[in-house]
Image (tube, coloured by chain):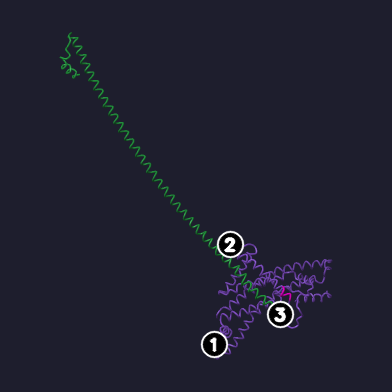
Chain colours: A green, B purple
Amino acid sequence: MHINLTLIVQMAVFAVLIWFTMKFVWPMILGPMQERERRIAQGLAAANKGEEELKEARAGAESILSEARERAGVIVDQAQRSANEILEQARSAATQEGQRLVAAAQQQIELDAARAKEQLRRQVGAIAVAAASKLLEREIDARAHEALLNEFAAQL
Amino acid sequence: MAAAEPQIGEYIEHHLTFLTNKPQNTLVNFTVINYDTVFFSVLLAVLFAGSFYLVARRASASTTSVPRGFQSFVEMLVDWVDSQVKDVYHGTNQLIAPLALTIFCWVYLFNFMDLVPVDLLPDIGGALGLAHLKVVPSTDLNGVFGLSLTVFILMIFYSIKMKGPLGFLAELTLHPFRVKNIFAQIPLSIVNLLLESVTLIARPVSLALRLFGNIFAGEMIFVLLALLTLAHGYAGLETFSGWGLLLLQAVLTFAWGVFHLLIITIQAFIFMVLTIVYLAMAHEHH
């Protein structure tokens, strides 16, 4: 148990070692560690932000989708309605046309019937004249009796 | 056993003697040097500084790489020391934290030499022609006082730097007894100075002797356990009791080694924490 020069040497070595650690070891380990800590914190914050943004984007997309769906429903409804309208219009047009056609046909029929009656009346007149001339055994002057015949025919 | 008595004495003496340039007969003699303490201190200092410097260079080369292996261990240690310092000291001194790391690692490595089998290195040294070899620098008073006196000098330096010479003197003379009357204060200041000086000087002394005592005692236990089989030599292997003693020594040495692992860590930790506390106190104004 003696004190000797070793004490001084030990103090010198210690001083050099402290200086070395302070200069070349401590800051070069702690500095990068703090830098890494900062990066990790940044990364975590960015991840959080990204997650938040994703959530927001999802909500936005959802609202856009539902809006689009709603609008599509409205459009489909409108299309349905206008299709119905067109159909209704076409139907009523067709009905009117049909009625018109039927009316025209009836008119034609009435016209034809009247014409046929006229013809028949004429022929009946002629037959009656022929028959009367047979009965009278003489020829009736058709021209002379035209007025009479016409009056007769009109009575038919 | 009677014939073995001087052998035991010699053996213990051998383990307590330093490898010096010349025998030392007075308590203090600054022409004598312990080669073994200096050699192992410097070796362990180079081991600590070198390995940490390699890690520091790799860490600062790229801050994006993932730390692994020894680098993780070093960073954990640095972070732990940093938090220990920040718990106690809230100033801006850039010296305290690296100093604390240096002390913890160096003292731990000193103490760890205690776990090297007690005869291994001295026997290798003996084969190389060295008469004595003491491998644990913290069982050398020069080794531990070298640390604590350096810490003491730093304490005084920062006390004076932070408080001024007068502030430091006031701290030594105006506590714990303080009166308003200046003439009554003068004799009280002398008492204060005595008390405070004892407190101040007790710090490096207790710092050094606590470490020295624990590690020296631990080494002594290893030496004493080695005595169990010392007297018998290879002849001990021919008897049943010889094998029993060998087994006993192995078991006890292992058990003490495991316990000592705890002690050397705690002692290194205590040395570091007290250094931080003392230097933090040197920065505080009272």
| Secondary structure under the numbered disc 1 in the rendered image | loop
Instruction: Tell me whether circle 2 and circle 1 mark residues in contact (CB < 8 Å).
Output: no
Q: Distance between the residues labelled 3 and 1?
A: 45 Å
Q: Distance between the residues labelled 2 and 3?
A: 47 Å
Q: Could you say which quadrant of the image residue B127 lies in?
A: bottom right
**Which dot marks residue A5?**
3
Q: How far apart are marks 2 and 1 (CA)?
A: 61 Å
Majority SS type along the magenta span: helix
| Residue at (62, 81) in percent of width and height | B200
The residue to which callout 2 is attached is: B64
The residue to which callout 1 is attached is: B179
Q: Which chain carries label 2?
A: B
Query: Sequence-wise, which precedes: disc 2 or disc 1?
Result: 2
| Residue B173 vertical placement versus B211 (above, below) | below
In the image, residue A141 lies at what x, y percent? Answer: 16, 12
| Secondary structure under the numbered disc 3 in the rendered image | helix
How packed mark 3 is, by other alpha carbons closer than 10 Å (few <14, some 14-19, many 20 or more), is: some
**Which dot marks residue B46?**
none
Left or right: where A110 falls relative to B220: left
In the image, residue B89 lies at what x, y percent? Answer: 57, 74
* Labels 2 and 1 in the same subunit: yes
Q: Mark 1 lies on which chain?
A: B
| Secondary structure under the numbered disc 2 in the rendered image | loop
Q: Which amino acid does label 1 sit on?
A: Val
Q: Which residues are the magenta region?
A: B35-39
| Residue at (65, 64) in percent of width and height | B70
